[in-house]
Image: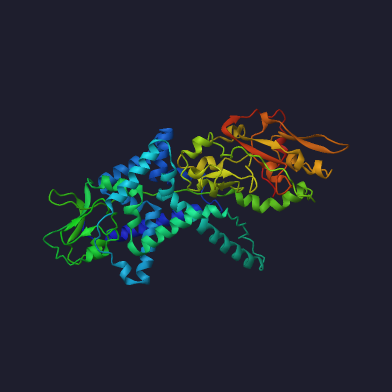
């Protein structure tokens, strides 16, 4: 196929995929339901592979489709379906607008030793159960972190700015949404990769894909034997070099009329640039190999609907349940947390950290902001993997959104009924911090917001009541810790279960009368 229409088809398709993936990460209104996540994420290579290894179900075989597509058409996945790859194309195009020389790539020899060393190290660590290197280098997860940590706050800021302007005209279709920052250390890795990917793509096109990305290197090996490829028509080629100057993978050696198939991502820029129709895309010929194409439907997900409900109704709920007393003294006993709390559906800490790629999809989907990227809670290998931070939020008793969106199986699907009986941690009461003990003041905020009444009030001194915890019915949702007014240390906190346990169903059904959406 010699038509330059190939490039335009690829461009339009890639733009739609990029917009879809970006929308899924910054969609704070949850316009797409959770049921859309599976189909959208089906063809994302690393999440699909990890989920298949864990579950072995047919719905997780998207990576096999990608491998088959690569064997047939070459690295079309990298140009058509990989959001990070498409983002790099966008950045390199901006580089071309800034300075024309950035658009003239030219042939460069590959960094063969470095790219295969990264692939082998990643595979070796993965083989012994370590997913950290893969999660750091996975293009899907890198893109997700860009959107979560940098793009979404910008969108929320613009939303709030517009909401304040419209509010002056009594128009409330758009409403204010809180922007909650993460710990500063969490931004280090995403910022470093934003600089690395941004600079490399701005100046050198697809250098990151063809040097650092293990998915690109793996698909490049397979693309060497692909059936459809970019190829030279030796009778028409005049060795003008336009194709090499337009190739953002720097993989076309026009002097020898050869294409490095392992690096070609089927952008079709070379076909579009050739005035003599000396390059084409088609079935492999016995004489000279070339490179690949293909098109397949993309994938990605959607999120955060419930946060809007919380933000819209939060103030009324606060008034309805009253305001907890304000302590006059600082608490003194530190929360002795032995284990972090991993999300419901993750089975336990070890299982979760060995499968999570830190793509931040669940962090975005969480309506109460309880899921926060870790810094050192899981150790160095678990940096940026989500943990339950009950100082930032609580786990809604009637919510299982994070269990529906995880693309790797690090968080397995849980029915609401099962989630309500999954004990991810246990509440621990510190009497020395409680204002009932220290200031002889009535409180009970923790008990009011406990959905199972595992935290309940018992007689203390005079008419005062003090909290008591029943471990067997506590699910570790953290509503008590989030509600506790003492600072800097809470009087009640949740210590994680290394392996999730089953809680006993509460005998009373009081939880129906208590709003499950936390008021603060």
Determine if residue 368 is in view.
Answer: yes
Query: Quadrant of the rendered structure where residue 469 is?
Result: top right
Front residue of 363 and 299? 363
Q: Residue at x 37, y 64 (%)?
A: 202
The image quarter containing residue 50 is top left
Pick the residue in front: 48 or 201.
201
Residue toward you, 142 or 4: 142
Q: Position of residue 174 (x, y in %)?
A: 60, 60
Q: Position of residue 40 (x, y in %)?
A: 43, 47
Query: How many labels sit on residues?
Result: 0
Is 382 displayed left or right of 251 in the figure? Answer: right
Q: Which residue is drawn at 24% across and 57% down?
A: 109
Q: How is the image coloured?
A: rainbow
Q: Is residue 15 visible?
A: no
Check the picture and name the quadrant holding the N terminus. Answer: bottom left
Left or right: 492, with 92 as reference point: right
Q: Nearer the viewer, residue 52 or 190?
A: 190
Judge from the rendering whether residue 264 lies leftward or rightward of residue 353; answer left or right: left
* Residue at the extreme bottom of the image, as rendered: 99
User: Could you say where residue 404 lies in the image, as x and y percent from the top left?
Assistant: 51, 41
Quarter occupied by residue 440: top right
Residue furthest out toward the left = 235
Whole-percent x, y for residue 412 in the image? 50, 36
196 displayed left or right of 7: right
């Amino acid at each position: 196929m010699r038509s330059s229409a190939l490039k335009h088809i690829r461009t339009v398709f890639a733009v739609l995929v990029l917009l879809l993936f970006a929308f899924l990460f910054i969609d704070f209104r949850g316009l797409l339901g959770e049921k859309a996540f599976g189909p959208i994420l089906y063809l994302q290579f690393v999440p699909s592979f990890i989920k298949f290894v864990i579950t072995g179900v047919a719905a997780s075989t998207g990576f096999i489709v990608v491998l088959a597509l690569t064997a047939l058409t070459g690295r079309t996945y990298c140009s058509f379906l990989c959001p990070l790859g498409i983002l790099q194309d966008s950045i390199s195009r901006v580089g071309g607008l800034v300075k024309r020389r950035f658009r003239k790539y030219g042939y460069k020899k590959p960094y063969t030793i470095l790219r295969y060393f990264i692939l082998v190290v990643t595979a070796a660590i993965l083989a012994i159960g370590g997913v950290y290197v893969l999660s750091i280098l996975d293009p899907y997860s890198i893109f997700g972190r860009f959107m979560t940590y940098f793009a979404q706050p910008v969108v929320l800021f613009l939303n709030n700015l517009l909401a304040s302007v419209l509010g002056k005209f009594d128009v409330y279709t758009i409403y204010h949404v809180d922007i909650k920052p993460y710990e500063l250390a969490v931004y280090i890795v995403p910022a470093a990769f934003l600089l690395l990917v941004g600079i490399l793509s701005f100046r050198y096109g697809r250098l990151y894909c063809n040097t650092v990305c293990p998915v690109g290197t793996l698909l490049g090996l397979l693309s060497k034997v692909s059936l459809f490829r970019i190829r030279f028509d030796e009778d028409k080629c005049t060795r003008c070099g336009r194709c090499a100057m337009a190739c953002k993978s720097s993989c076309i050696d026009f002097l020898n009329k050869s294409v490095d198939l392992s690096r070609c991502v089927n952008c079709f820029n070379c076909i579009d640039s050739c005035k003599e129709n000396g390059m084409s895309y088609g079935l492999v010929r016995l004489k000279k190999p070339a490179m690949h194409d293909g098109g397949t439907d993309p994938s990605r997900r959607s999120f955060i609907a419930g946060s809007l409900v919380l933000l819209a109704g939060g103030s009324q709920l606060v008034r309805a349940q009253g305001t907890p007393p304000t302590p006059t003294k600082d608490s003194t006993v530190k929360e002795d947390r032995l284990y972090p709390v991993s999300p419901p559906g993750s089975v336990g800490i070890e299982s979760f950290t060995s499968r999570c790629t830190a793509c931040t999809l669940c962090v975005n989907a969480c309506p109460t902001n309880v899921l926060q990227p870790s810094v050192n809670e899981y150790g160095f290998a678990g940096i940026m993997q989500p943990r339950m931070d009950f100082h930032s939020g609580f786990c809604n008793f009637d919510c299982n959104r994070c269990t529906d969106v995880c693309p790797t199986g690090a968080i397995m699907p849980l029915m609401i009924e099962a989630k309500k009986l999954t004990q991810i941690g246990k509440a621990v009461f510190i009497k020395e911090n409680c204002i009932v003990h220290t200031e002889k003041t009535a409180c009970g905020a923790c008990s009011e917001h406990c959905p199972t009444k595992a935290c309940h009030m018992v007689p203390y001194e005079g008419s005062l009541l003090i909290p008591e915890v029943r471990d067997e019915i506590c699910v570790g949702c953290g509503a008590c810790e989030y509600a506790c007014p003492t600072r800097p240390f809470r009087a009640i906190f949740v210590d994680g279960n290394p392996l999730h346990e089953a809680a006993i169903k509460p005998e009373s059904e009081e939880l129906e009368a208590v709003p499950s959406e936390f008021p603060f």
